[in-house]
Amino acid sequence: MDRRQRWAWVEVGLWTALIWTFSSRWFSASHTESVLFPILRWLIPGISLHTLIWVHFLVRKAAHGFEYGVLALLVFRSLRLGSSRSVGVSAALAVAFCLVVASLDETRQYLGLYTAMRTGTIHDVAIDVCGASFGIALALSLRALFGGAGPAGPGLGPAPRAR
């Protein structure tokens, strides 16, 4: 494994740690609400409490999808660097990796380990996997449109040939 490959896996580890940090009590609904509600009230004076609650819910769920979309891209890139694995196999493994991370994270929250203020649900795992799948689909679409590495970055293009 060369330096680029090692660093790619370090990035996966760091992003996974960030996701687990976002699962802490500091990013629970009550904490994010205390930040998001005032911003929304400033941006949209007269916004109803019902709308605030819905926007808060949607922002939190979109964040789940985004976090795991990025994680899937990082894993996909790590798997493609220096590998002869096909794009399809790399994509499936990246989504499977995200499924495992999401399941462990939500289980940890469900059991109340380290995060008594959080609740883990199968619905959040589904949102996480959808985000991962969307991230991979977007990368593959950009790859098909632009060919090779394209604007999605290095490592998303064809695997280097073995010498």
Image (cartoon, rainbow, N blue to C red):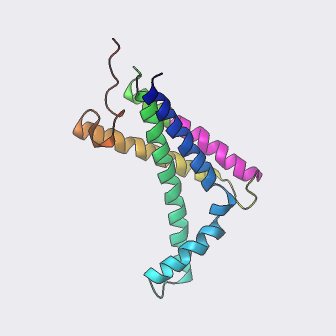
Question: Residue 96 sits in which quadrant?
Answer: top right
- On whether residue 96 falls in the magenta region, the answer is yes
- Name the spot of residue 67 as percent of width and height, x first: 51, 51
In this view, the residue farthest toward the top is: 163
The stretch in magenta equals 95-113
- Name the spot of residue 25 as percent of width and height, x first: 69, 60
- On whether residue 72 falls in the magenta region, the answer is no
Residue at left 52%, top 84%?
48
- Name the spot of residue 63 as percent of width and height, x first: 51, 58
- Foreground of the two, 78 or 50: 78
Using residue 119 as the reference point, say whether residue 135 is left or right of it.
left
Q: Quadrant of the C terminus?
A: top left
Question: Residue 162 sits in which quadrant?
Answer: top left
Q: Is residue 140 above or below residue 29?
A: above
| Number of residue marks | 0
Residue at left 24%, top 35%?
147
Q: Is residue 32 above or below residue 109?
A: below
- Foreground of the two, 4 or 127: 4
Using residue 86 as the reference point, say whether residue 143 is left or right of it.
left
In this view, the residue farthest toward the front is: 3
Residue at left 41%, top 28%?
80
Question: Residue 28 sits in which quadrant?
Answer: bottom right
The secondary structure that most of the magenta stretch takes on is: helix
In this view, the residue farthest toward the left is: 146
Residue at left 46%, top 46%?
70
Q: Is residue 47 above or below residue 4?
A: below
- Name the spot of residue 82 as percent of width and height, x first: 40, 23
